[in-house]
Amino acid sequence: MREWNIQSGDPGVYVIAADVRHGSTNYCNDHIWELKLGGGEPPALAIQTTFGFRARNFRIFPRFIEGDITRVDPTTFERTPTIKKFFPNYLLVAFSPYTGIDVKWEYWVPESNRILGRIQITNTRLVQREIRLQLAALLYPSDDGQRMVPQDIDSVTALCGQTGNLYPVIFMTGGPETTTGPYPALSVTLNLAPGGSRQLTWVQSAVEDVESSKEKFLDWALIPWEPEIAQIEILHQSIIEIETGDPDWDAAFAFGLKQAYNLLVGPTHHLPAPSMVLSRMPDQGYSGLGDGTDYDHDWSGQLPLEADYLSTFLLPASPELVIGLLDNFLETQTQIGFIDLKPGLAGQRRRILATPILTQLAWRIYQATEDKSFLRNVFPKLLSFVQSWFTEQQDRDGDGLPEWAHPLQSGFEDHPVFSQWQPWSQGGDISKVESPSLCAFLYNEIQILIKIAEITEQSSPIASLEALADNLKSAVLACWDDTSSIHLNWDRESHFSPQGAHLGSREGPGEITVNSQFDHPIRLSIRVSECEEIPHRIRIFIRGVGLSGNFRIERLEWEQFRWQVDKGNVSSDQVYTSLETIEITGVNPKDKISIEIMDLSSVDQTMFLPLWAQMLDQNQATNLVNQTICNENKFWKSFGISACYLGATQDDFPFKAVHMIWNNLIGEGLLKHGYQKETMELVTRLMNAVIQNLKSENSFYTYYLSDSGRGLGDPNGLGGLPPLNLFLKTLGVQIISPTKVILEGKNPFPWPVTISYRGLMILRETNKTKLVFPGGQTAIIKSPERREITLENLL
């Protein structure tokens, strides 16, 4: 197993929490810790948390005293802290506070409400040393709390405190004394002979009554570490390990894998398997209501696109966890095939149909397991799910081209046209639009369903699936726009993609005169904003000529609006070739009303999905890549593919945001069409953004700015994990098992890459690849042709 040497300033993420594979997790009361290699007050090597905002801060850190020299600040150490090992629930740090005194300090979170530490201090000098070790604990409690104070518990010395409804208790072996100055601490004097070592352990437990916090902490302090840490290391050895020519890349991939497992919690009685959260940080993990129903969007359920992206880190090592994520979705399936978009561990449901990428998730599982019985079991469920997209509830005009019901379904909620709550968005109704992205998702699902039907010899649905796919493909090919070299969204009724324009605005009730004719039918986006209260009596009357050529008056009521705090959005039900007036009644005098043409000419990252789904003819694919995706004046930026086409006056977010999940899909599309060099460049740009933030902030971020690489959104969010899947696909390596590998193409990166997985070693050089199987059998592959190499074929 690789030993690391990661110090302050190197890429790193030092968050640890209970690991679902090795101990229990408490969805409603999960304590998450972060190690700081320095800084704070006082500057220290500190493990810290807020218990999900129940404390302002809680820090545990060491102080060393030898003679009259005290060392707390790591910058004063003889050898500063170095991370040697890191797992989702474990960290090993090595350092030397004084010359000749070596310290190994381990942190382990065995379950959600406890953290343990083990300390080994060695005297490497030829003279005896006396070192006083203090384990300090600084609790900054909530208003009704108490800082840590010494207390005897059954004749055992401990530190105890209170914050909110928690009672933290700390105990350390070695017969410690207590000290209150300058910080509450447990103190042990160590007389170290030349070459001698001492080992101590400590336990911090915090639960919601003082007696429960105190009980069993002695048992935890005496628990044998070696078999537990051995189990953790065995789990880690089953995960892919990557060694490139750049140690920063190696660290980023390794911390990305660690963080992926950190995002799993559960299960509960509401879902059958561990689920995922979108980020897991010390300020999270506590439900004030006690059941999780009050959690925000990061902890309120699993989303299909995010689950698919997470699966690329968990596979091939942990197929059971990915099967569990799929099972959680299938648990919500109704008799008509409906699967909920965001099932949560507290029973949360969005009651919106899931993004059609679950068949792809099942296919990823099959590629890692080659389990045909799994495919036979899920095929009818996934077939019913895809068919549910073509019902009248989803395909509102019955043309075989369904519409999204909510921007969240599309995987791009902060859309500049369809976001309902952002001030810079039009607030357009996405259900009145047909999109190339939804067509592409469905087309991809159907193609996989056809493969599964063939593998499992269930051919009866194939003909109808092919007909659905042909219709989707024809629609996407028809929405190609030569001017912008991209596939545009189009209006559900008119099938045109009009350019947005401001038609008028006013304050309070009254009339807006338009008196305009339009080259193509348009749909209105109407926003009411700065409302002191929701105007329940609002009515809007639109007078104009509809698609049929007849004059009409359309009335919109307040129930049709989507209200967010002080504003509401509505899109007209009808499209218009000309407009006369728009009358507004029932609003307050200071309410602001704005009327715009819904803009379907704007371009964004979702429109590249037909490339990924392989729906395009060669001419469209070439133009899309060369004129749009890889055009530095449009989407191709220093740190990845931006979410939207960048105009000179547009704000950083969402236009300049780089979404790693979407870049991964777009990169897969580039590879499918032979653009390996471009994908290698994309991976490099994305990794530059990731590494920059890991070095400066010790964090992944949900988004990265395309021009500066600065992180945005949630720290250590799933959406910001490094593009491991895209890197391996670009490298041309697909690991099925320790005895089966698929190779394709050549290594386009500037250095050899070594991949280790459960005894398998792959050395990928520019023009050849060496494979060493677990039994020592070796194969050398020089051909760039796609090839499946198995141990069985070598024997």
Image (spheres, rainbow, N blue to C red):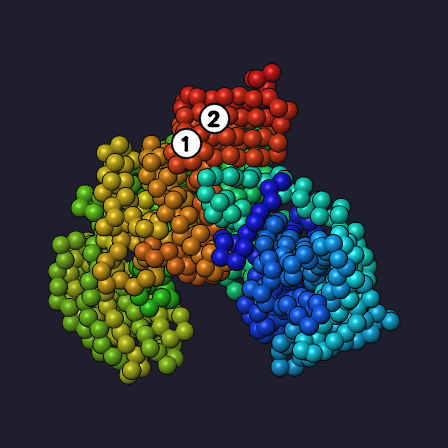
Identify whether 615 is placed above or below 11. Answer: above
Along the line of sight, the residue nearer the viewer: 74 or 205? 74
Please tell me which residue lies in front, 650 or 174. Answer: 174
In the rendered image, is residue 672 in sight?
yes
User: Which residue lies at the image location 60% right of the left edge and 62% below the top edge?
Assistant: 77
What residue is drawn where x is 63% and y is 57%? 95
Q: Position of residue 118 (x, y in %)?
A: 72, 57
Amino acid type at circle 2 is: Thr
Give the label on residue 747, or none: 1
- State the SS at label 2: strand
Where residue 400 sits, quadrant-wise, is top left
Tell me which amino acid carries mark 1: Asn
Name the residue rendered at 77%, 67% in the picture: 188
Mark 1 packing: few (<14 Cα in 10 Å), some, or many (20+)? many
Where residue 705 appears, x then y in whole percent?
Answer: 36, 57
Q: Residues within 10 Å of mark 2 (few under 14, many from 20)?
A: many
Q: Does residue 319 show up? A: no
Residue 209 left/right relative to 591? right
Label for residue 564?
none
